[in-house]
Image: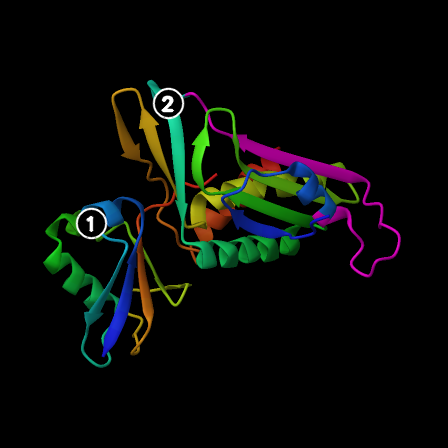
Amino acid sequence: MQVTIRLFARLRDLAGTGELARDVEEGATVGAVWKTLAGEFPALAEYESSISTAVNAEYSRMDSTVSDGDEVAFLPPVSGG
Amino acid sequence: MSTTRYRVTHDPLRLDDLIDAVTASPDGDAPPGPGALSTFVGLVRDHNVGRRVLRLEYEGYEPLALRSFELIGQETAERWNVQMALHHRLGVLQIGEASVMIAVTSPHRADAFGACRFVIERIKQIVPIWKHEFFEGGDVWIEGATADPDDDGARESAYRLASAG
């Protein structure tokens, strides 16, 4: 199955794109999607302990499972205001 | 007249839009006359940790930012008897421009002040928006809090700051 990955701010800069589609295994977790991504872009690894995640624009956890067609977002520490 | 409570926009912010949103009567009758209106406006500062700032570029995950605004609205209503509006700007902002505006009405000033402070503290904790700072000699993404709306400690910290006045 395929998911759309969204990256923001410095994560987007490090990966060189804000949106990419990747195949993941059936029943994959958000954490598994992150591992796939960090394997492809090793510079992202430093963010593993500080990112937040979202599935279909709702905050999620690393152990949340994803479904075909989901939008999975990885968010560095926020700085709005 | 705009009465949108929560907004993320690339357009310049207008405080009147927020005030309209929190003072307009929902059923079109006479305004309720809340007694107190408190506002907060965040402006782009010309310096940050010793750097001379030239401009900021704000990026956001808009649908989740709006949901976070709604959550902050619910948390605010659980603690105070208030009406709240919150607008945040994205894109390139020059020094002195408004990046965020909050308006809160309440029957009494203590609630209006407290809720307004709570909202800005909570924005900095859980809203997926980021500042890209361009300063003399370089640029840097500003990274503050790891956003976790379920972190009770962070929420209590924001409530405490709001109650301290």
Residue B150 drawn at (x, y percent)? 44, 58
Q: Is residue B157 visible?
A: no
Task: Tell me which amino acid carries mark 1.
Answer: Gly
Q: Do marks 2 and 1 share a chain?
A: no
Indicate the secondary structure of the residue bearing disc 2. Answer: strand
Q: Residue furthest bottom?
A: A26
Label 2: few (<14), some (14–19) or many (≥20) C-alpha neighbours in 10 Å? many
The residues colored magenta run B21-46
Label 1: few (<14), some (14–19) or many (≥20) C-alpha neighbours in 10 Å? few
Give the camera-side residue of B148 and A32. Answer: A32
Q: Residue at x 48, y 38 (%)?
A: A81
Residue topped by disc 1: A16
Q: Is residue B67 above or below residue B8?
A: below
Q: Residue at x 57, y 45 (%)?
A: B87
Residue topped by disc 2: B53
Residue B128 drawn at (x, y percent)? 41, 50
Q: Is residue B34 above or below residue B46?
A: below
Quadrant showing the C terminus of chain B: top right
